Image (tube, grey):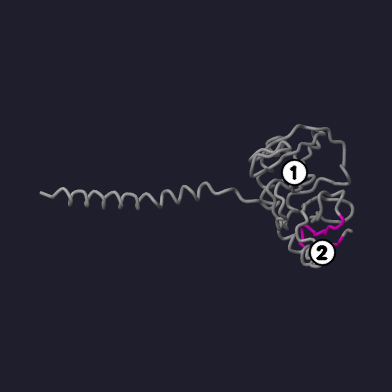
Amino acid sequence: MLKSSSLQLLLSILMLLSACSDAPKTEKAKEAEKAPEPLTGRQAFQKMYPQARAWVIDASPLRLRSVRLSTKPQKGKADAWEAVFISQSLAKSKTFTYSIVEAEGNLHQGVFAGLEEGYSGPQGGAFPFPVEAIKTDSDQAYDVAAEKSADYIKKNPDKPITYLMEQTRRFPDLTWRVIWGESVSTSDYSVFVDASTGKYLEKAH
């Protein structure tokens, strides 16, 4: 028979082995709880588009823009995105959002559908565009814009960035507009990138 001291030692070893075997499970659980990461525009659009088609089969995208939640500029990504879809058959528009977190401004985690509104034609100069035209993502658009904006970025390293994709009469193709500033209306600098070809188009001051 084992002596009392030997038995206690054996039990201690067994408990230690059991604790070691549980460690990987704990680490895996922590990895699963990792905070969600920001998305590119195309990634967010692909999550919202099926919901828009469920709303109405002829839903066409009109505008996609990033919604800034983080104070730190993110290169081609955002914590939330907003997409406006229109239906010619219903003469209605509907706004969808995708957010990685719950936030102010009626932002909910995942895809969230807003209310229907009337639609009678181009809004703010923007026209509905085919989904197939989205061949360049927002992170790629940022890279192109940043290459042309090295001096500006060096002088304004912490300036917030907004990404806007829409089709207007200004250019023949769908475009990304990489906007430095608090909003589109107050921005003093932005760069247009062709969303179909990925080519640089022009700067706006």
* Residue with the mark numbered 1: 83
Q: Which mark is residue 152?
A: 2
Of residue 94 and residue 144, the one placed in the foreground of this image is: 144
- The answer to whether 121 is drawn above or below residue 191 in the figure is above
Q: Nearer the viewer, mark 1 or mark 2?
A: 2
* Residue located farthest toward the left when viewing the structure as drawn: 1
Amino acid at dot 1 = Ala
| Element type where label 1 sits in the image | strand
- Residue found 83% across the figure and 33% down from its top: 118
Residue 63 lies, in percent from the top left, at: 79, 46
Range of the magenta residues?
188-203
- Residue found 78% across the figure and 56% down from its top: 159
Query: Most prominent secondary structure in the magenta stretch?
Result: strand
Residue 180 lies, in percent from the top left, at: 81, 56
Q: Is residue 202 magenta?
A: yes
Q: Is residue 189 left or right of residue 37?
A: right
Separation (CA) of disc 1 from disc 2 = 29 Å
Q: Is residue 28 magenta?
A: no
Amino acid at dot 2 = Tyr
Of residue 187 and residue 138, the one placed in the foreground of this image is: 187
